[in-house]
Amino acid sequence: MSSLIMQVLPIPKHFHNSPAVRRRASSVVPLCCSLQTGGRRSGGYQPALWDFDSIQLLKTTNCEDERHLTKRVDLIGQVKKMLVDVGVNDVARLELIDELHRLGISWHFEDEIIEILYSSHRSWVDPTDLYSTSLGFRLLRQYGIPVSQEVFDCFKNDKGTNFKPSLGNDIKGLLQLYEASFLQTQGEETLELAKEFATNLLHKKLEGSDHEIDNNLLSSIRGALEFPAHWRVQMPNARSYMNAYKKRADMNPTVFELAKVDMNIVQAQFQQELQETSRWWEHTRLAQQLPFVRDRIVECYLWTTGVLQRREHRYERIMLTKINALVTTIDDVFDIYGTLEELHLFTTAIQRWGDNDSMMQLPPYMQLCFLALQDFVIEMGYDILKEKGFNSIAYTQKTWVDLIESYLIEAKWYYNGYKPSMEEYIKNAWISIGGVPILSHIFFRLTNSVKKEDVDRMHQYHDAVRASCTILRLADDMGTSLVEVERGDVPKSLQCIMNEKKCGVEDARKHVRSMIEETWKLMNTEMMRVDSPFSKHFLEAAANLGRMAQFVYQDGSDGFGMQHSKVNNLLRGLLFEPYA
Ligand code: 0FV
Ligand code: MN
Ligand code: MN
Ligand code: MN
Ligand code: MN
């Protein structure tokens, strides 16, 4: 026991950077072994790409200095003028709003944008112009302003059974119609029709290599077919949009300059937040003591920049990154290292939270995990009580208990060789992906006055929560399940569908993608509900959690555990390399 206490002993903060401490840390014998001993599995995960020291030494920019901040204020003023300039026609204004969003700078203009969208409401609905109607429709819904799918009725044929064939020549209009269709809520048939109609025609345009379509438009179509705008997270995508925007003949230099200055200021803020979380992660010693877990603090932080996009949510991002790291750690305990007997003990200890005897039954490596989690839950609960006057601890604990019980169900399935149906699988797997503690945290932080009634609806896992977690699960399975099942794991979505439908992996992927699209309809319904128990910021973050999963697991590969190069390049651009 005494050697455990030695190893777990905290290292005082001011020693964190000292070489002596780092040497001592690396000579500590881990509480468990990374080798495949005693029938334990291996995740095959590579070490972290960025070590503690290199993160702490980051200082690539001095962009938070006075000069840059003043420049940004000036540029914001100029762009505001452009937005409200009476000389600008409605369509150009809508295009500017869309661009500000894609460039990641729309938050500077939120009040202006909402006012413009409200006041111009419907003035752009023009039966002769599919482009502006579709763009306007999408932006209104994106900003939570109600608008009916009926605005598209005038583009349908006389019987109303499909869109008019003549629209097939309006490529820019089709692209916008396609984008608009992803804002559909459940049961909106016109928008479903719009999606099929536009998708088919856009695919044909690409295949036909039509010489009349210019290259910029072609690449926009390609990008949109892969990822519609509504599914894209703002910040991690902003930089690649900036690169495309820069090359366009109609780009606005002032807007571009603002995006550039802002990107570098944000990067400096992100670096500080990352440094703070990395100090916490180092302090937990989880990566050293449990060498089988994914050591992914930078990737965990990247997630949060997509989920919580608003600059002022600094504390929330730091805490969310810690949740991501704890979820990842405990997930790896269940999926990789723990024996079934140990996993039962861990589940019992969590169910009897606070009961010391149950905790003392655990092997030391699990005690470390448990205490790290407990510390964190108390810290978070303390802050919420202090700031919101609500004691959230029992609710937070419930989310962890539910998560860990769902992990145990999967572990039992695995050890029994049980193959669930897709329905049975997903009923458990939307929880086992780890979204519930994430959303509970975001709920408490982003709700101004916390009411018990709403807290209950959150923790009975309202549809908005379920939709967000389901997208997260389905996207994760697309990116990780082939490797997981090979290593030894329960059948995930792809395998359940392949078993059930007796189909190949490509058909299973198509099926999962259509399930993601269906779930988005539920998410959209919840986001547009006028009687939602949730704040706008919470719903935005819940949607972003799904978007971020689609981003990290894009192309069906694992940009988190396996550090896929596409995601890595975007990560470098966002967090480490100033925009020159
Ligand atoms: C998924 O890992 C994943 F990234 C986790 C659990 C990290 C925490 C969650 C967020 C950062 C949102 P993995 O594929 O191993 O998860 P499953 O559930 O498939 O074991
Ligand atoms: Mn410390
Ligand atoms: Mn896992
Ligand atoms: Mn798992
Ligand atoms: Mn997975």
Image (cartoon, grey):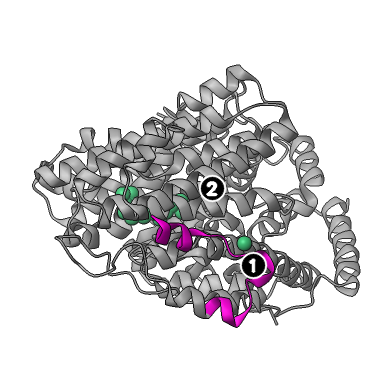
Specify whether 543 is left or right of 60.
left
- Can you identify the residue that label 2 sits on? 544
Count of number-bearing discs: 2
Specify whether 507 is left or right of 315.
left
What type is the residue that disc 1 sits on? Answer: Gln
Specify whether 355 is left or right of 90.
left
Say if disc 2 is inside 8 Å of ligand 1. Answer: no
Are there few (<14), some (14-19), or many (20+) residues within 10 Å of tag 2? many
Q: Quadrant of residue 187?
A: top left
Mark 1 falls on what kind of element?
A: helix
Say if disc 1 is inside 8 Å of ligand 2. Answer: no
Give the residues drawn in magenta, as a range: 1-22
Q: Quadrant of residue 190?
A: top left
Q: Is residue 3 one of those drawn in magenta? A: yes
- Can you identify the residue that label 1 sits on? 275
Q: Return the x and y of residue 54 as percentages of the image width and height.
A: 59, 79
Q: Return the x and y of residue 559 as percentages of the image width and height.
A: 41, 66
Distance from the alpha carbon under mark 1 to that under mark 2: 23 Å
The answer to whether any part of residue 178 appears in the image is no
